[in-house]
Image: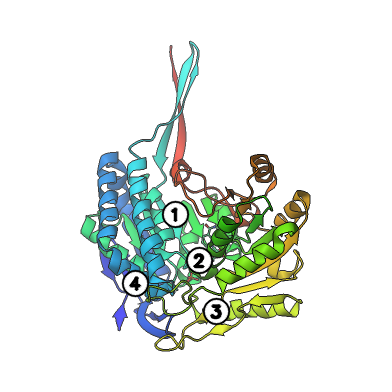
Amino acid sequence: MEKIYNYINGDLVKPKEDAWLENYNPAIGEVYSFIPDSDGQDVDSAYKAAQEAFPLWSKKTLKERSDVLQKIADLIIKNLDELSLAESIDNGKPLALAKKVDIPRAATNMSFFATAILHENSDTHQMNQLAINYTLRKPIGVVGCISPWNLPLYLFTWKIAPALAAGNTVVAKPSEVTPMTAYLFSKICQEAGLPKGVLNIVHGLGPKVGEPITKHANIKAISFTGGTETGRKIAAIAAPMFKKLSLELGGKNPNIVFADCDLDKAVSTSVLSSFSNQGQICLCGSRIFIERKIYQDFKNKFLDKVQNLTIGDPLENTTKIGALVSNDHMQKVLNHIQIANDDGGVLLSGGKQYAPEGRCENGYFVEPTVFEGLSYNCATNQEEIFGPVVTLTPFDNEDEVINYANSTKYGLSATVWTKDLNKANRMSHLLQSGIVWVNCWLVRDLRTPFGGVKESGVGREGGAYALNFFTETTNVCISYD
Ligand code: NDP
């Protein structure tokens, strides 16, 4: 069976203890490869390689750094089919989705930051007759990047691209649940000629690999995407060490549908924002609030589309709903469905595990599930499920829906459907959310600030926000005298 290796100092290497973890294909429920069960010793080796690589990498010209990162982007596209298949097998997501979204976006992340550094400017502040200040941006040194399983290569590259572009060297940990494309990525880095030690990838468990990265005295910045509780643990370690911290955490996003919207567009986009990637996107809108006047209409049209979603083998072209990422995660989602039932929710669609016929009969599938009749403050409407489960709730006015929308501890994204621009602006001001989409969902301009408020995170990724995070500033004040 295939083994995945760590990528340290430019080489593909075994973990020091030669210990291995099983890696599952969630669509068939079987182990299909082994990944390193690394520990602090492997993190130390990775750190050492990164530290040695830093002086040369940070002193390369912007053009030299840009060229290597662009080459990596080109190789991702060249290997689109292989990477998409690997992502689908490792994660359970439909192959068509990996091919259309995950892998192209990973390439775009690399090329976006490869070119962004060529077009940057920095501030100057003039003091008449006296002095001029300019802002110098310097790479931090060795930085840590920790990413989750839901959009594996997409989110992995979203962190390491700005870190490397800004001149840092990196110790990175992908999710242990979906390590395959990060492994293939290390081979791409070798082929692209990324100097050894500039990027180091250590595979393994959160507590055994992620924690040593977080605790490392000389890894000065941590960029983390994952669950809120893991983010809290990381902050508890890193904050007293005065590390720079970027935390992209969980969400429980409202999708607000006003009666004056384009109903057909709201319905079809809501199906995507509910169930894309089996609802395992931090930006999915799992709480759908519908103005009462159109509640029945929306509900009928929405259920009609949901019941037509094809669920099953992720490798089939027609599949819209693939497998959940693991058995553990499936059990967690099924438990949430049970809680929604116990709390008096009315099940409108789905609600069960699903066993497709054929090779995927033992896979981790859950039907797209829709509830109504639950209060806005019950567990189902407050806790992140991160699966194919949504609720429908009617509302009568803006104040009421703002209260519902802002009632959770999260504040990542929100969607508003209305043709009234004034209403859209009012809502955008009042929603406690890092991102508001009006009449659309998941439309992304990589220059914009990306991140959450409240327990959805600290800091922003994207464009200059990410490059600022991965640099330290020095103000240089030069006297005119
Ligand atoms: P986790 O928080 O469980 O894991 C994220 C990463 O952290 C994994 O690589 C994990 O390793 C690692 N990790 C786990 N424990 C520790 C630790 N003690 N110290 C350091 N690292 C650790 O999240 P999931 O992978 O389950 O991802 C789902 C979550 O991610 C959801 O809450 C979702 O909302 C959030 N998310 C947020 C996004 C955003 O942009 N705001 C985007 C995408 C997802 P291991 O895999 O071994 O456990």
On screen, residue 214 versus residue 66, left or right, reads right
Give the SS element for disc 4.
helix
x and y percentages locating residue 76 in the rendered image: 29, 59
Give the SS element for disc 1.
loop
The amino acid beneath tag 2 is: Ser
Name the residue at 48% across, 18% down. 126
Residue linked to disc 1: 219
Residue linked to disc 2: 276
State which mark lies toward you, 4 or 3: 3
Counting other residues with Cα less than 10 Å from the Cα at mark 3, is it few (<14), some (14-19), or many (20 or more)? many
Residue linked to disc 3: 366
- Give the mark nearer the N terminus: 3 vs 2: 2
On screen, residue 242 versus residue 120, left or right, reads right
Name the residue at 60% across, 59% down. 236
- Give the mark nearer the N terminus: 1 vs 4: 4
Q: Do residues under tags 4 and 3 come within 8 Å of each other at their CB atoms? A: no
- Give the mark nearer the N terminus: 2 vs 1: 1
Q: Do residues under tags 2 and 1 come within 8 Å of each other at their CB atoms? A: no
Counting other residues with Cα less than 10 Å from the Cα at mark 2, is it few (<14), some (14-19), or many (20 or more)? many
Q: Quadrant of residue 403?
A: bottom right
Residue linked to disc 4: 86
Give the CA separation, mark 3 to mark 1: 40 Å
State which mark lies toward you, 1 or 4: 4
